[in-house]
Amino acid sequence: RDGNQWIWPADNPQGKNYDISGLEHLEQNESEIILTLSFTQHSPVFNEFAKETKLKMVKIQATVMGNGALGHPEDGIKFMAEMQRLLHTLKCSYGVNRIHLLPCASNAVCVFFGKAFDVHHPEITIYDFDDGTMVPILHVKNENGLCKIESA
């Protein structure tokens, strides 16, 4: 949604305009981590949540914030593919079994991230903002080869 309209803000693909940081701080057996999707803002609440939980954080952050940070469907498809690789790497290379997902992003970013989830990825607990903190709202996991979504 851009400019109060349900449109793609870019007529042509923009290319990758986000960075992934924090992988360099992970060790091989990180059972749980925080993953942020910071495309409209990187909220200070994310850092407070990390301090409270004492979990390491991997940030996916737009280089230019806003609903248009993922501005074209082709960019979304490339983002989805990179997120599939990242989730696989987190599971296989770092031993991550659970991700605490803190999103502050457009619908497009969230949908393409969700489409990236598959049977070989860690479980994901998705959080939302509530009274100055983050609260769990959904839990996504694989059960017998099927994606299962539950209220958290």
Image (cartoon, helix red, strand yellow):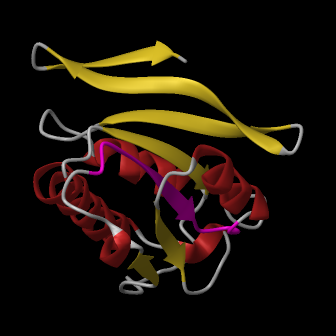
Q: Is residue 52 above or below residue 140?
A: below
| Residue 65 rendering spot, x and y as whole percentages | 66, 78
| Residue 96 rendering spot, x and y as whole percentages | 26, 46
Q: Is residue 109 above or below residue 147?
A: below
| Residue 34 rendering spot, x and y as whole percentages | 48, 52
Left or right position of 72 against 152: left
Q: Is residue 105 above or below residue 16?
A: above
Q: Residue at x 69, y 65 (%)?
A: 2
Left or right position of 144 against 41: left
Q: Would you say residue 109 sits in the magenta stretch?
A: no
Q: Residue furthest right?
A: 131
Which quarter of the rendering shows the N terminus?
bottom right
Left or right position of 37 against 43: left
Q: Residue at x 47, y 33 (%)?
A: 125
Q: Residue at x 20, y 57 (%)?
A: 94
Q: Quadrant of residue 26?
A: bottom left
Q: Quadrant of residue 40?
A: bottom right
Report if residue 6 is visible in the image.
no
Q: Residue at x 19, y 48 (%)?
A: 95
- Span of residues in magenta: 30-42
Report if residue 115 is visible in the image.
yes
Q: Nearer the viewer, residue 86 or 31?
A: 31
Q: Is residue 138 above or below residue 129?
A: above
| Residue 93 rendering spot, x and y as whole percentages | 13, 59
